[in-house]
Image (cartoon, rainbow, N blue to C red):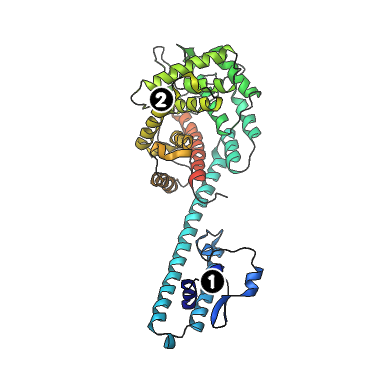
Amino acid sequence: ISQYFRAISSKNPDFMRVCGRTRLTETDGRNHVSNRRRENSKSVVPLLVPWVRIPPSPPGLWSAIRDELPAAFYCAFSNVSLKNQGKTDVIILLVCLGFCAIMIKIHIYMYTWGRRLVNTFEKAREFIYRNARPIDLSRWQYHFENGSKKAVLDILSCYQNEDGGFGHALEADSWNPNSSPIQTWCAVELLREIDFTDNAHPIIKGILKYLESKNGFVRNKWASEIESNNYFPHAFWWDWNPDSEYDYNPTATLAGFILKFADKKSPLFYKACEIAREAANSLLNRDRVDDGHLLLCYIRLYQCCLETNTITLFDFDEYSKKLMKFVSQAICNADIDWSCDGVVFEYINAYAYDLQSISLSSDKINYIVNYLKDNQQDDGSWNISWDWSNYAEEWAISKNWWKSYGIIANMLFLKRYQSCSLD
């Protein structure tokens, strides 16, 4: 080992090409890489790679220790003469032994860290296959098991009514089978999730048909609650009240959807342009946005305008700046216990190209990653932090649906921002 470090310090070119598990031999009074090993090597791998790479299974750790350490000790005790070399070599030897111990600890830590994420994935998968609705199972398979978009679309179409809108508890907190703007918004979000943009597909054509019919359209906005909600199990926040004042959730998202998929010469498209301008002005006149889903709808409008080059509909630069400010505030104040609804993660994904613009540091990302891994429950899910406060039996079912939804949201975040593979 001491000879090895002496060679490195002398910048010997042969030693700068040393590979992991390479046998050292003496030639002309110096240690060189074995010619046979060098010729048979297909690639040059840095010496430390075998130590810090996460092994696929425990044997990877033990084989590394078995193969590396005996060679290191052999070199140390066969090539180093403590009597002749003196105290300097003793110090070097001790340093090298300490270095080996550190590498072993790093390898064990990396292995444990990697296996921990794999266990997170395996537990999440088991919950999905045991509890998820077909729509969420197809989403899981699409994101993590090379599933197809077609499988997702086929199941999604089962939630679509003849009028083109969506119902049947696609939004798991409302069991209303009738078409509603908020459940149609859920379908729009899912289409974006799988990056589906074929405007000739029956699902997209049906949504445009529903929006053109203006069902649930009140005072130039699509209502977030409709009257028939009250006749079916639902969370209290979906109660319908004839005196309700509606904001731009889900209107801003639905207007963006129209801008993206409708015929540019249709009355529906012109109506969406008008709504988009009004929605943008409403954001510009705000000091803050407390509703997380409303903020997400403003983000979707921003994205659709970029994607369709309709940024001239309003003061897009000011809109962009103010939106970024509100997103930054929302992330700083976000309660991570609500991560299962996926909204905060959508904020992050929307600005993934420049996380610093929304004041999101790598430390914050690491905190979220560690939080998710630390707080996964034994059954593979994460806690759902909200409650209907009524319809206890139906809520028990919907809570399980939400757990599946939350698992997908959380695992997608880990997949995107975790440094190791989920395979």
391 lies above or below 355? above
- Asked whether, in this view, residue 130 is left or right of residue 233, the answer is right
Q: Which mark is residue 230?
A: none
- Asked whether, in this view, residue 72 is left or right of residue 389, the answer is right
The residue that disc 2 covers is: 318
Mark nearer the N terminus (1 vs 2): 1
247 or 310, which is in the foreground? Answer: 310
43 or 390, which is in the foreground? Answer: 43
* Label tally: 2
**Crowdedness near tag 2: few (<14), some (14–19) or many (≥20) residues, C-alpha within 10 Å:** few
- Asked whether, in this view, residue 183 is left or right of residue 204, the answer is left
Mark 1 and mark 2 residues within 8 Å of each other at the beta carbon: no
Gap in Å between the C-alphas at discs 1 and 2? 58 Å
397 lies above or below 113? above
- Asked whether, in this view, residue 195 is left or right of residue 107, the answer is right
Residue 365 location, x and y as percent?
42, 44
Residue drawn 44% across the image and 65% down it: 105
Residue 278 location, x and y as percent?
44, 16
Residue 171 location, x and y as percent?
51, 27
Q: Element at badge 2? A: helix
The answer to whether residue 157 of the structure is visible from this angle is yes
**Crowdedness near tag 1: few (<14), some (14–19) or many (≥20) residues, C-alpha within 10 Å:** some
| Res 23 → quadrant | bottom right
The amino acid type, in three-letter code, at marker 2 is Glu
| Res 268 → quadrant | top right
375 or 349, which is in the foreground? Answer: 349
The amino acid type, in three-letter code, at marker 1 is Phe
The answer to whether residue 230 of the structure is visible from this angle is no
The residue that disc 1 covers is: 15
Residue drawn 57% across the image and 70% down it: 21
Q: Element at badge 1? A: helix
Residue 267 location, x and y as percent?
57, 11
